[in-house]
Image (cartoon, coloured by chain):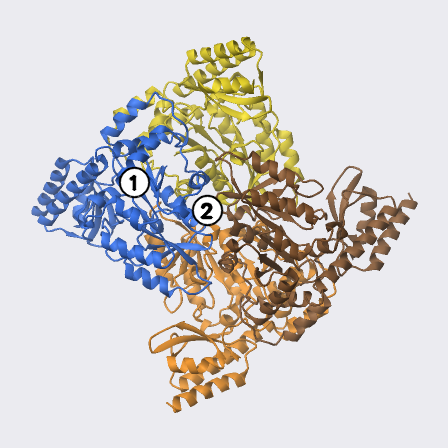
Chain colours: A brown, B orange, C yellow, D blue
Amino acid sequence: MIYLLNDYSVLAAEEVLARIRENAGNNYGGYGLDEICDSAKEKLHSYLKDDGRCDIHFLVGGTQANQIMIAGMLRPYEGVIAVETGHINVHECGAIEATGHKVETIKPVNGKLTAADLEAFVKARDDEHMVQLGAVYISQATELGTVYTRKELAAISKVCRDNGLYLYVDGARLGVALVSDSCEGLKMSDLVELCDCFYIGATKNGGMLGEAMVIVNDDLKPHFRSLMKHQGGLLAKGWLIGLQYDVLFTDDLYFRLAEKAVRYAEKLKKGLQDLNIEFLIDSPTNQQFPIFDNGLIEHLEADYAFYIWEKGEKKSAVRMVTSFASREEDIDALLRDIDNYQKTR
Amino acid sequence: MIYLLNDYSVLAAEEVLARIRENAGNNYGGYGLDEICDSAKEKLHSYLKDDGRCDIHFLVGGTQANQIMIAGMLRPYEGVIAVETGHINVHECGAIEATGHKVETIKPVNGKLTAADLEAFVKARDDEHMVQLGAVYISQATELGTVYTRKELAAISKVCRDNGLYLYVDGARLGVALVSDSCEGLKMSDLVELCDCFYIGATKNGGMLGEAMVIVNDDLKPHFRSLMKHQGGLLAKGWLIGLQYDVLFTDDLYFRLAEKAVRYAEKLKKGLQDLNIEFLIDSPTNQQFPIFDNGLIEHLEADYAFYIWEKGEKKSAVRMVTSFASREEDIDALLRDIDNYQKTR
Amino acid sequence: MIYLLNDYSVLAAEEVLARIRENAGNNYGGYGLDEICDSAKEKLHSYLKDDGRCDIHFLVGGTQANQIMIAGMLRPYEGVIAVETGHINVHECGAIEATGHKVETIKPVNGKLTAADLEAFVKARDDEHMVQLGAVYISQATELGTVYTRKELAAISKVCRDNGLYLYVDGARLGVALVSDSCEGLKMSDLVELCDCFYIGATKNGGMLGEAMVIVNDDLKPHFRSLMKHQGGLLAKGWLIGLQYDVLFTDDLYFRLAEKAVRYAEKLKKGLQDLNIEFLIDSPTNQQFPIFDNGLIEHLEADYAFYIWEKGEKKSAVRMVTSFASREEDIDALLRDIDNYQKTR
Amino acid sequence: MIYLLNDYSVLAAEEVLARIRENAGNNYGGYGLDEICDSAKEKLHSYLKDDGRCDIHFLVGGTQANQIMIAGMLRPYEGVIAVETGHINVHECGAIEATGHKVETIKPVNGKLTAADLEAFVKARDDEHMVQLGAVYISQATELGTVYTRKELAAISKVCRDNGLYLYVDGARLGVALVSDSCEGLKMSDLVELCDCFYIGATKNGGMLGEAMVIVNDDLKPHFRSLMKHQGGLLAKGWLIGLQYDVLFTDDLYFRLAEKAVRYAEKLKKGLQDLNIEFLIDSPTNQQFPIFDNGLIEHLEADYAFYIWEKGEKKSAVRMVTSFASREEDIDALLRDIDNYQKTR
């Protein structure tokens, strides 16, 4: 079975595993208070170009990271704005609401929130019986693989600041977004300038598990570790996550792994386009959404693992995901199989 | 620095690490739906002797496990009973209350809940303006290293069943409890008979991270995965936890590691007793609470990492913890140092 | 100033006030455990034709009633379905989310949920990372004044039962719905047959304050008073609410007051139609949504209190609400003023 | 049956009822935004001597008031300190925990929190895995009828300010406390100086229902109405509560009613003392806790309603409560009955 199901089916990059092996016998302080975490943070700061001014915390997973950070940003009566397709709105089983907060939604354009729609939404809110708006949540890359350019992000940031809203970026797939041509040169350090907080995901980009929360806004820094504990998110062997970031942010490994994933995705996309396959959306990152005949889908399911995204009567959009662990020969095989299938019909 | 600070400072048992290495390149299904988790559950069932009747779920950490399971047991207006020293009452930063539930407390005897005190507490509750009692939480071993015998557990279980309360056992340190002489032959399979749910901790007994929740009572089984996701507790690479249990429950490794920890603790205890050191409590497991002169504590802190449990003016109780990764020579060194310190005063 | 702003600007029906005066000096049991509440429940049962089988509880307000009942119906990971315009989704400041639950929304048709849309929505849900669906919320009458017929309600009820969802009806304006021709003979007793729980609102129909929750489904009955207390909703002088229901459900007063409100609304509607005014929606109850030129609105605001519902550049929809306390001469005055305004332009 | 059960069994003072009658036909703005609430606030400000600087909000009941105010004071990971007998800890069915916060408890002395115990408790807290302390809750008068003097309150206030804790006073029975000799001249305006927020209860002192929250600290003022709505606590006909305060704080009515209650209690206390009855605690307010033989209790229960507070084998402490609506002849009757009972044994 060839895996195009997701970007978290393989454990971790070889470099990460090697480093774990090296440190396996050592004793480290608990709950992320240790020298490896310190080292990892130092390396992250050099990429953030923030002179150590941001707070960095290592969390286990994305839903937990979103839940904790959003609960930390909001007052009890406040809600968070997301696009309708936002991960927190659809795929977290109500984890945000579990902390007492409403997710208010805006229709996405190309999977993204637009600054204009955000502004209109915020301006229209003027009833004290409605949820107060406290923060904006976006994902970079989005749930549909698209990415925000620096300009788009700056425009959203401006609307947030003009209206007293925190801006939070879910970076579960930040790596592939930043190496994509479509983000037009956006850098990790730009996020420090434009956002109040964001996380740099490792689970889907070479790490075994872990997400690094970066808190830029001083108001959000106090007692964040208490927030983590209070939501069951403080890992006993926290240094295990720190270690992964220490490796991933040495010699640009994080970005090299992301580039691999995007390169494989581009090969897949180009190959499918050559076979006249259409796409649900034009994604520049490691998630691709080709539209296949249902017969082809059935045929492929025997050998390939992927996800049916939008089921139709004759055709359906599927999601195929690449990662640092994808293999070129697997993509070649897939394209060949589709070509053969098309020829024999 | 010699570590007696806790039982989660070293990553994992060698056997666990070896198995991770073997599987590092493979693709597995996400969120705990994979063949390694299936295999691990099968092995656990053989220890539980339950004919596969319990549900088993793999969680990341103890606070999270407690938070999810307790939220799953209770109706909104119900509370959970624990001893005053219970982990959920003291050391989880309000994680239970975060899910909306009150922790009602009873004074412990030797770190433990007694069936008699529980019964009296439950009988005294008859006011509808007070929290309804829904469940009882105990830890095996307790936060003070003591253990419940089969008889004690059966008595508590009876009070729970007579009064419509769920019984939940926090097994963060279940291994050391079950290998301790003091539990008088209590087995993992006895918990299936006596409790509604409990977890078998790996983080503190040879695993890298992970706790296995065992749900015995059918009423608590439905949609537990939704509960996990809803609290941010469904790990993307869930097979990583399953794998650890698969190794730990092969050839009794889990118990052999626990025996090591207890053996080191006994050596430490016996050695300290020989030096006329008194103890805060008589613990038969891997946590020991000797009472040292504050001068001795200061002297030891240069070379040994441990935790000051109860600070006094002249003497203080400290906590010293052993684990599978402790070394006999370190304990010898500690005893020698204390002996020397005592002689030179 | 003539009030068409809402249906809760006047304290209570004269009969209610008279009865309060009579009982003002008496002592009654606290928290709704008293003989007046008992009497009121008996009267309600005779309208419900349920042989006393439903549980009835007296609550203070609508948002609180929704919050408590919905929290009582759901497991932590479950959400409640409502139309986008539903009161719980828009005008309760996140009170449902405050109890940890997501409100999932469906686009309304004529202000109402359709059984077909509900079924399609439920059938499409099959991902365990999404919120589990636990209950359906509708309002009778709706937030836009429209009403469900018995047939429509039965169809929704069937979808709910086929899919294991509780059906809850917010009856803040149940009176005007039941006396409206548009409900095609739906009776209070039909709700007992079709719903799992619903409330009969008094605040907006002759009462001073109070909503009577009717729990039909046995599964939802246990410990409801604890749920109320736990959400701060158990009124010390609960008999004050019981008393109001005791009066309102003597000699059909509740329905006679609702008929008054609807009669005034029909007069208003007919009068505006004669003046060629268009409406946002065709409402058969006491809320009317005429569309006025913004100039007319400005003109009317000097003498009439009403709510601007949807602001447009030239024209806006306003909400005008009648109640048992409305006066015919006020409606005549309004119609005359509008007629004059139109003639002089 | 003579009522000594509680201080909320009679509807309201005659003056309050008269004023309701006067305003019964008028239209007022919804949700507490009306001229009667404005007038009531003005009167309250004159008693608070705060130059209008405090925010005042009208809430329906005490549990709700506590729940909303405490949720408003705390960050998610913070808890509130109360004495073990505190209303929020015992008699609110977990309403504080429902908002996600732990109630941390200190043993009371004479029903009260002492500044020394509070300071020791706060100083001992230094573990980030424990709940962060955010606020202190006390009741004036306490649940046992005792009262804080100005000096005691000032000492608690100092500890709070030195340690960054908000101080909140539950004034469900503030009236009887302030008119009691034991408070040594404490005035309502002193609370403005010493506390961050407190409420002035009407339900138990002449009002029909309602509690007036006074927010002194500017940090706690923003969006309090949203907090109220979010917890289902914004009453549609809010002016009904405002009206009651407008009457109660005209010509000192609030204090005159409290004085009546205390005078009746003193008569009861003195009379019982003359009969050699002992008391559980020496209460200077309207709650008295005499200790009766169980035989006497059984005898009295036929004619008098009161509450058994602490059941013993031979003797039990009962709670007898007076209010503005108590009658001297009833107390005379009770004393006579007890005297006769004692003589005939």
Between the residue at mark 1 and the residue at mark 2, the CA separation in whole angstroms equals 28 Å
Q: How far from the left and from the top, in percent, is residue B237?
A: 66, 59
Residue farthest toward the bottom in the current orientation of the protein: B344
Q: Is residue B66 above or below residue D221?
A: below
Mark 1 in CB contact with mark 2 (< 8 angstroms): no
- Total number of numbered labels? 2
Q: Going by the image, does C271 lie left or right of D224? A: right
Q: Amino acid at mark 2?
A: Pro
Residue at the spot of label 2: B76
Q: How far from the left and from the top, in percent, is residue B273?
A: 40, 84
Q: Is residue C88 above or below residue D117?
A: above
Nearer mark to the viewer, of 1 and 2: 1
Res. A106 visible in picture: no
Q: Amino acid at mark 1?
A: Gly
Could you classify mark 2 by the number of other residues whose Cα lies within 10 Å: few (under 14), some (14-19), or many (20 or more)?
A: many
Residue at the spot of label 1: D201
Quarter holding the N terminus of chain D?
top left
Please report, as a chain letter, where disc 2 is located. Answer: B
Res. D211 visible in picture: yes
Q: Is residue A317 above or below residue A201?
A: above
Q: Are marks 1 and 2 on the same chain?
A: no
Could you classify mark 1 by the number of other residues whose Cα lies within 10 Å: few (under 14), some (14-19), or many (20 or more)?
A: many
- The residue nearer to you, when weighing D345 against C209, is C209
